[in-house]
Image (cartoon, helix red, strand yellow):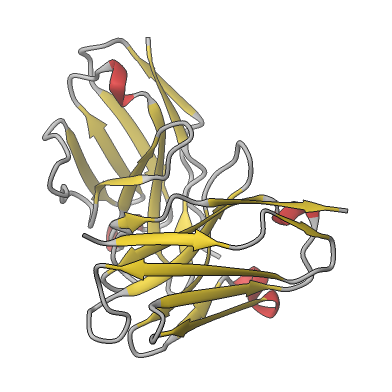
Amino acid sequence: QVTLKESGPSQVKSTQTLTLTCTVSGFSLTRDAACVSWVRQPPGKGLEWLALIERDDVKKYRTSLRTRLTISKDTSKSQVVLTVTNMNPGDTGTYYCVRGDTRFSAYDSWGQGLLVTVSS
Amino acid sequence: SYVLTQPPSVSVPPGQTARITCGGKNIGSRNVHWYQQKPGQAPVVVVHDDSDRPSGIPERFSGSNSGDTATLTISRVEAGDEADYYCQVWDISGDQVFGGGTKLTVL
């Protein structure tokens, strides 16, 4: 059974850096065809893809946020980490860790999500 | 950047058919995925690659994609289908793109 769980702070201040960790189980970040992405959702609004990392460590970032995002993985811990620099209130939302077979695939597994609030 | 356009809301009586559209330039050349999100829950994929249904998703959910419009069709709509629905595609820029979402109301 595939599971993903997000962890990190629930509150950050403007200009701070947010670091989120996704701990996965039920699949391997190195052996299996797996692409892990981060998707966020501002309160009451739609879904917004942020970044992905593939099995071979290929990384892709949302064009409009490229300079603020970094995605990486720690295979020994089965974790994918997302950092977002220079946080502002517009970054408030629920952050989801999601899995697909490839970057072209649907996200077949989602974490429960983590609400992050940015205060000014 | 590529844009997907969905109607903000769709309303249908129970037992009828709901059709939720997702418009994009030449979207028919792309693989479209559809997600259902109920309040307070993470999204769930209901249709992937235009028209494939994951195991556990009722046959009432189907998808099609041609030209500039992809459509999610929900037959014999039930109260439990009330949710937000999002379409998604991969763009050549490398971005994953979501539509703005459609709120389905069962009257």
Residue that extends furthest to the right in the rendered view of this protein: A120
Question: Visible in this render: residue B90?
Answer: yes
- The percent coordinates of residue A92 (x first, y second) are 70, 51
B97 with respect to A118 (left or right): left
Q: How many marks are shown on the rendered structure?
A: 0
Residue at the bottom extreme of this rendering: A56
Asked which quadrant contains residue A26, the reply is bottom left
Question: Which quarter of the image is occupied by the N terminus of chain A?
Answer: bottom left
In the shown orientation, is residue B29 left or right of residue A116?
Answer: left
Up-down relation of residue B40 to residue A68 (above or below): above
* Residue B102 coordinates in the image, percent (x, y): 45, 34
**Image point (41%, 55%), residue name:** A111
Up/down of A2 relative to B79, above or below: below
Q: Residue furthest front?
A: A77
Q: Is residue A85 or residue A9 the one in the foreground?
A: A9
Residue at 35% from the left image edge and 74% from the top image edge: A35
Image-based side of B78 in relation to B89, left or right: left
Residue ID at (88%, 53%): A120
Q: In front here: B69 or A84?
A: A84
Which x, y percent locates residue B106? 36, 15
Residue at the (25%, 72%) spot, across then down: A27
Q: Is A115 above or below relative to A104?
A: above
- Find residue B2 and report its horizontal and vertical position in percent: 50, 62
Query: Does any portion of residue B93 appear in the rendered image?
Result: no
